[in-house]
Image (cartoon, grey):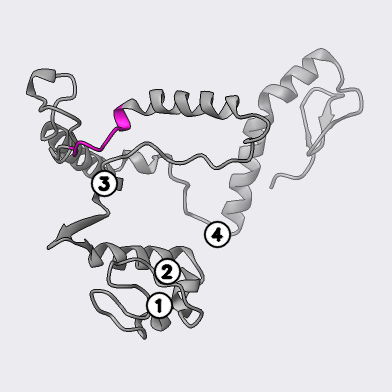
């Protein structure tokens, strides 16, 4: 069996587990020790494993190289290719309608959407803000850029705004996952198109002290 100390056949050169000892600081002994250290270390590990009855060998194949992972990656690439193929080509301007269009859904933005002029609007706001220094340094900068998402917060039906209750429910679920909130307590409140304890007839949140759920939102 191997021990913690290994000596060569030509004295005087002797090494321990971690360092050279004796007269082994000679260049030839140091070179021999440095070049064979990794082999001796692996041999020592294998002997200890053999002594303990360990027969399992460490795998040398990365998980990304397995057949199942390669098939899964190929399916994901094909799915991505199909999705991108169904999009509107952003470089083919001849196929684009007038105004701003969502290349994924084909939705055309309404006339009040001005996100394409966001840089120009931001520069104007910055110049106006700098002119008002120092008096208006803490003034609030109002949002003047309207996106397609902002323009679709509500629809008007018979002159009254209509809120998407499914979107409200999705937001509640999202809050439940990110905040310390008990979903059972949330579901104890009334579920309706416009819950009277939380929203008014226009869909806006109602301000009142007894609305505990609103406070948690």
Residue 53's tag is 4
Label 1 vs 2, first from the N-terminus:
2
Q: Residue at x 75, y 45 (%)?
A: 3
Marks 2 and 4, how far apart at CA = 51 Å
Residue 85's tag is none
- Residue 43 spot, x, y in % from top left: 62, 40
- Say which element carries label 4: loop
What is the residue that sits farthest to the left in this orientation? Answer: 95
Label 3 vs 2, first from the N-terminus:
3
| Mark 3 crowdedness (10 Å alpha carbons): few <14, some 14-19, many ≥20 | some
Toward which corner of the image does residue 66 lie, by quadrant?
top left
| Mark 1 crowdedness (10 Å alpha carbons): few <14, some 14-19, many ≥20 | few
Mark 3, residue position: 151
Residue 183's tag is 1
Label 2 vs 4, first from the N-terminus:
4
Specify the segment rendered in magenta: 109-116
Q: Nearer the viewer, residue 38 or 116?
A: 116
């Amino acid at each position: 069996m191997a021990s913690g100390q290994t000596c060569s056949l030509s004295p005087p050169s002797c090494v321990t587990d971690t360092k050279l000892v004796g007269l082994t600081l000679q260049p030839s002994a140091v070179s021999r020790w440095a070049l064979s250290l990794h082999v001796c270390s692996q041999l020592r590990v294998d002997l200890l494993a053999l002594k303990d009855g360990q027969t399992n060998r460490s795998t040398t194949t990365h998980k990304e190289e397995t057949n199942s992972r390669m098939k899964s990656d190929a399916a994901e690439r094909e799915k991505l290719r199909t999705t991108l193929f169904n999009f509107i080509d952003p470089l083919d301007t001849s196929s684009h309608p007038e105004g701003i269009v969502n290349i994924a859904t084909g939705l055309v933005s309404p006339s009040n959407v001005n996100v394409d002029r966001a840089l120009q609007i931001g520069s104007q706001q910055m110049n106006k803000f700098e002119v008002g220094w120092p008096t208006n340094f803490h003034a609030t900068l109002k949002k003047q850029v309207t996106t397609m998402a902002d323009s679709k917060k509500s629809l008007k039906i018979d002159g009254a705004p209509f809120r998407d209750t499914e979107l409200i429910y999705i937001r509640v679920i999202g809050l439940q996952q990110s905040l310390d909130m008990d979903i059972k307590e949330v579901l104890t409140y009334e579920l309706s198109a416009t819950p009277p304890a939380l929203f008014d007839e226009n869909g806006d949140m109602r301000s009142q002290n007894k609305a505990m759920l609103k406070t948690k939102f």
